[in-house]
Image (spheres, rainbow, N blue to C red):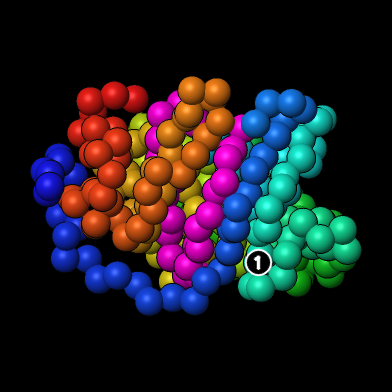
């Protein structure tokens, strides 16, 4: 059954044919005795945007944190199953987790610039990874701020505190900070939820431009945003025992206009959630 939504026309958007960047097979996530995710399986394509949607509490952010092992920082958390980045299992005991988090960066829901200058915010990661030369750092900072569409706005404010920027600028600064360590995957956990509509559109435009070179996975409650920016979409729900499950996954145009599962249709048309 085809449905109509108040979203941009995405029915004719070409489906990207991309290699798999992240492969997720039969993944279960537990926090102590509580099962947060159950039997998650999907392939995330490279150089594209994948949106994870679903009602609050269904495990969207938990799934996002699996991809750079941020859940490891939560006491009692453990993952079962297999997740591969470019064919390499990331939950292998020999994996360098610091290197993994360099390759798979994270942008959080609330902008979180460090209490230091704009320059030092962006240079922080490269410094931690051994870059000491000031001119090299300056090149990295300028390149990253250009990529984050922020350079023209802050090029004369590099010595000022990142906390003095507007909310939208702070979020783009955080994106620049991630880009500075040259990741391959960028995870975004509701990156626009604290921003006004103008700042939100700037972040969305930025995501579309970055998807040429990066794999982006975004968690969002905003159906219009998911339809506008993503190439593929994953719809999650919570089962009676509160474990999150993947209901449907596929090209965004298909999921939003001709979903295969009635639960997907009910959610995106606002019947629940």
Quarter in which the C terminus is drawn: top left
* Magenta span: 36-58
150 and 177: which is toward the camera: 177
Residue 216: image location, x then y, percent: 50, 58
Q: Residue at coordinates 24% horizontally, 33% vertically from top-left?
A: 266
10, above or below 52, in the image: below
Is 83 colored magenta in this rendering? no
2, above or below 130, in the image: above
Residue density around tag 1, few if under 14, some if 14–19, many if 20 or more, within 10 Å:
many
Residue 117: image location, x then y, percent: 70, 44
117 and 107: which is toward the camera: 107
Q: In the image, is 113 to the left or to the right of 57? A: right
Q: In the image, is 238 to the left or to the right of 69? A: left
18, above or below 247, in the image: below
Circle 1 sits on which residue?
Answer: 85
Q: Residue at coordinates 68% horizontally, 26% vertically from top-left?
A: 34
Viewer can see residue 11 = yes
Q: In the image, is 252 to the left or to the right of 59? A: left
Q: Exactly how many numbered labels are in the figure?
A: 1
Q: Residue at coordinates 55% horizontally, 48% vertically from top-left?
A: 40
Residue 264: image location, x then y, percent: 29, 40
Is 46 colored magenta in this rendering? yes
Q: In the image, is 220 to the left or to the right of 261? A: right
Viewer can see residue 127 = no
Q: Residue at coordinates 18% horizontally, 45% vertically from top-left?
A: 7
Q: Main secondary structure of the magenta part?
A: strand
């Amino acid at each position: 059954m085809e449905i109509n939504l108040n979203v941009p026309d995405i029915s004719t958007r070409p489906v990207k044919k991309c290699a798999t960047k992240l492969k997720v097979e039969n993944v279960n996530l537990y926090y102590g005795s509580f099962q947060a995710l159950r039997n998650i399986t999907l392939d995330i394509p490279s150089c594209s945007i994948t949106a994870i949607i679903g009602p609050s509490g269904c495990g969207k952010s938990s799934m996002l944190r699996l991809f750079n092992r941020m859940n490891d920082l939560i006491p009692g958390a453990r993952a079962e199953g297999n997740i591969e980045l470019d064919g390499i299992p990331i939950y292998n005991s020999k994996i360098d987790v610091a290197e993994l988090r360099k390759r798979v960066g994270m942008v959080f829901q609330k902008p979180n610039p460090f209490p230091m200058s704009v320059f030092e915010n962006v240079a922080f990661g490269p410094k931690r990874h051994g870059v000491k030369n000031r001119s090299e750092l300056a090149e990295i900072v300028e390149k990253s701020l250009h990529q984050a569409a922020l350079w023209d706005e802050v090029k004369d404010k590099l010595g000022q505190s990142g906390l003095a920027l507007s909310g939208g600028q702070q979020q783009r600064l955080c994106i620049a900070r991630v880009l500075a360590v040259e990741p391959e995957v960028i995870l975004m956990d509701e990156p626009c939820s604290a921003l006004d509509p103008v700042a939100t559109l700037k972040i969305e435009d930025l995501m579309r431009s970055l998807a040429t070179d990066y794999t982006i996975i975004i968690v969002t409650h905003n159906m219009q945003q998911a339809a506008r920016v993503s190439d593929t979409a994953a719809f999650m729900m919570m089962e009676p025992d509160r474990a999150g499950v993947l209901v449907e996954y596929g090209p965004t145009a298909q999921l939003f206009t001709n979903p295969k599962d009635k639960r997907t249709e009910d959610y995106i048309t606002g019947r629940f959630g």
